[in-house]
Image: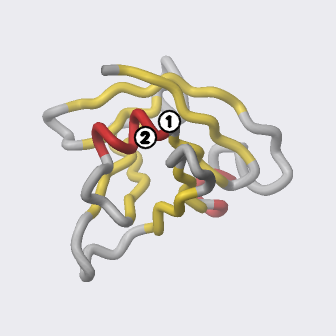
Amino acid sequence: MSGQVRIGDGRVRLPRAICDRYFAGASSAALLERDGEVYLVPLAGPSAGGLLLKQTNAQGDRVLLAPDFLAERGLGQFVAERTFDVRWVDEAGALLIEGLGSSPTG
């Protein structure tokens, strides 16, 4: 499954369909850049750490606040949201946010 997320103003906004499929048991997540690509990794359990995934509306959409990480990529506070394609990468156990990293294609 692929989909889209909205990123800007230091936030990653995830639609419910993506959350239900890939982040169902996760209360937090980590943003990681590896080999020039950015991944959103679901984390579960009370000692998992990471950034809190907050529910933002009755539909079940969620938001992750990561102003420092996103500011380094030009999407910090006061920057308008942009839409990014995402896809699940089994080998990484994470959601790849296409075009957010520093790879030559992104």
Judge by depth and name the residue closer to the eye, 27 or 59. 59
How packed mark 2 is, by other alpha carbons closer than 10 Å (few <14, some 14-19, many 20 or more), is: many
Horizontal side, residue 79 vs residue 8: left or right? right
Mark 2 or mark 1: whose residue is earlier in sequence: 2
Please identify the quarter of the rendering in which residue 30 is found: bottom left
Q: What residue type is labelled 1?
A: Gly
Q: Which residue is drawn at 63% across and 63% down?
A: 68
Horizontal side, residue 69 vs residue 3: left or right? right
How packed mark 1 is, by other alpha carbons closer than 10 Å (few <14, some 14-19, many 20 or more), is: some
Q: Which residue is drawn at 24% across and 66% down?
A: 44
The answer to whether residue 20 is seen in the rendering is yes
Give percent across and percent down for residue 50: 39, 69
Residue at the far front: name it. Answer: 58
Give percent across and percent down for residue 46: 26, 80
Q: Do the residues labelled 2 and 1 touch (CB within 8 Å)?
A: yes
Judge by depth and name the residue closer to the eye, 46 or 76. 46
Alpha-carbon distance for marks 2 and 1? 5 Å
Q: Which amino acid does label 2 sit on?
A: Val
Residue with the mark numbered 1: 101
Give percent across and percent down for residue 102: 51, 34
Please identify the quarter of the rendering in which residue 48 is found: bottom left
Please identify the quarter of the rendering in which residue 21 is found: top left
Residue at the far right: name it. Answer: 78
Residue with the mark numbered 2: 38
The answer to whether residue 36 is seen in the rendering is no
Give the quarter of the figure containing the N terminus.
top left
Residue 68 sits above or below residue 96 on the image: below
